[in-house]
Amino acid sequence: MSSNLALLPEPEPLRAVTVSRDVQEFDLLIEDMEAELGEGWGDLDFNETIAFLRQDEANALEFIVIAVDQDDEARLPQVAEIIKQAKSGAISIILVAEGLGPAAVHEMLRSGADDFVPYPLPEGALSEAIARIRSKAAGAAQAEANAEAAAAAGITTGGGAKSGDGALYALQSAAGGDGATTLAVNLAWEFANLSKTDAPSVCIIDLGLQFGSVSTYLDLPRKPVVFEILTDMESMDEQAFRQALETFKDKMNVFTAPSDVLPFDLVSPEDVKSLVTFARGCFDIVIVDMPNTVTAWTDTVLGEADIFFMVCQMEVRSAQNAMRFQKLLKAEGIPDERLSFLLNRAPGKMDMGGRGRIDKMAEGLGIKFHSILSDGGKQITEANDQAVPLREIAGRNALTKDIAKLAETLHEIRQSILAGEEVVPAGKKKAVFGLKFG
């Protein structure tokens, strides 16, 4: 007996799901999901999702999209639990949010969400987010395959730096306008130009989350992925980190400040430690431009840095702030052996009383300046306005020469340390046949 039943087409495999209070409230999301996946997606409410994620069917999911608005604020702990459950199953998460404050979005990103898209969805935004998580997943798979192949071949893999632990120098102004960013940018550029054939790899990180201007001084764009890196440090890998970097003239890599003004507590001390540690594993030299404000992670950078430079000027407010910073470290019991001082815009050689004023300032602070940098004059402002390093348009400027000398000295010390040679710290005297020579 023949059957007249028509053969039904095989249903399209489930590749993604949306999770929301009511997906009909997000009509643009429905349209974009259909455009991206056709019939290969479904929708769940918050109460159904945890049970679904524990089923074998969930293992085939490529990603989930969690859609929330201001009416879901009371459900955010439940949403965080869904995110953690999905991440435990290696499922990528895209967060779509409308009307939520930055703190709520930040908390969900810290819970493990891989990407964030605002609602109403900008044209192509969901497609771009899906492409990013697919690229990230493909990169992770390739890295795992490479590691397995290397292990099979008996090869040990590591970071990008030759030693696996690049040098880290941080700079912070004692007062606004003391020139730490100018010095950070140009010190990094001098490191990158130490040799035409064997210059160290250099990365400069701008931690001025609110008004960082490293990108302005180099005329570089600020990538949106910087915000994603800062708010989801746990899921960062080498590929994601390098995607966040801008390259300046093929010689220097820059991790810019985010495009928006962000609160300093958006990142934790652990996040900052992860960022600088990761950068040191990828580059020979890492320069960190610190914000003027003392943050919850200032001592983290101080502890990680080879040298933490406090940049001062010959003026009362700068001296007072430098002294207050020293008192803060002492009060908090934070070691200051890595803290050093740079005097910027120092009096010129023709100023007969300049040397005495420098000595008096150093004596008042109870320090010895690591380097005394010349006042470069109007050329410095012009170079910054033109967004080019000093070496390019003011190579003969006294400040350019001083920064180049500082970079050369720091590099020589670094090379001596790597070679296992004894290095005399700045300000110390070395004993020779029982005598001390300064």
Image: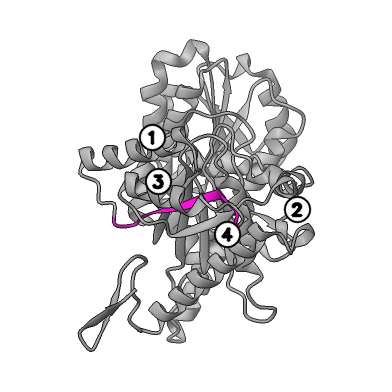
Is residue 90 among what the camera can see?
no
- Residue 323: percent from the left, percent from the top? 34, 39
Marks 2/3: CA–CA distance? 32 Å
Amino acid type indicated by mark 1: Gln
Q: Position of residue 408 (x, y in %)?
A: 55, 72
Q: Is residue 390 above or below residue 102?
A: below
Q: Give the left or right position of residue 398, taking residue 44 as reference.
A: right
Numbered disc 3: secondary structure: helix
| Chain-order first, disc 2 or disc 4 | 4
Q: CA gap, disc 1 to disc 4?
A: 31 Å
> What residue is pinned by disc 3?
361
Which residue: 37% across, 24% down? 78
Give the class, few, some or many, for how many residues have Cα within 10 Å of label 3's Cα (few <14, many ≥20): some
Looking at the image, is mark 1 or mark 4 earlier in the sequence?
4
Q: Which residue is mark 1?
A: 320
Q: Residue at x 24, y 46 (%)?
A: 334
Horizontal arrangement in the rendering, residue 360 relative to residue 39 (left or right): left
Image quadrant in which you'd find residue 126:
top right
Q: Is residue 343 magenta?
A: yes
Three-letter code, disc 2: Val
Quick one: which residue is furthest to the top in this view? 71
- Seen in the picture, residue 131 relative to 64 is either above or below; the reply is below
Upstream in sequence: badge 2 or badge 1: 1
Task: Kindly indicate whether the residue at mark 1 contacts the one at mark 3 (C-beta within 8 angstroms).
Answer: no
Q: Which residue is mark 2?
A: 388
Q: Residue at x 41, y 39 (%)?
A: 319
Quarter in which the C terminus is drawn: bottom left
For the residues labelled 3 and 1, the Cα–Cα distance comes to 10 Å
Q: Amino acid at mark 3?
A: Met
Please give the residue where the numbered disc 4 appears in the rendered image.
Answer: 203
- Closer to the eye: label 3 or 4: 3
Dot in front, 2 or 3: 3
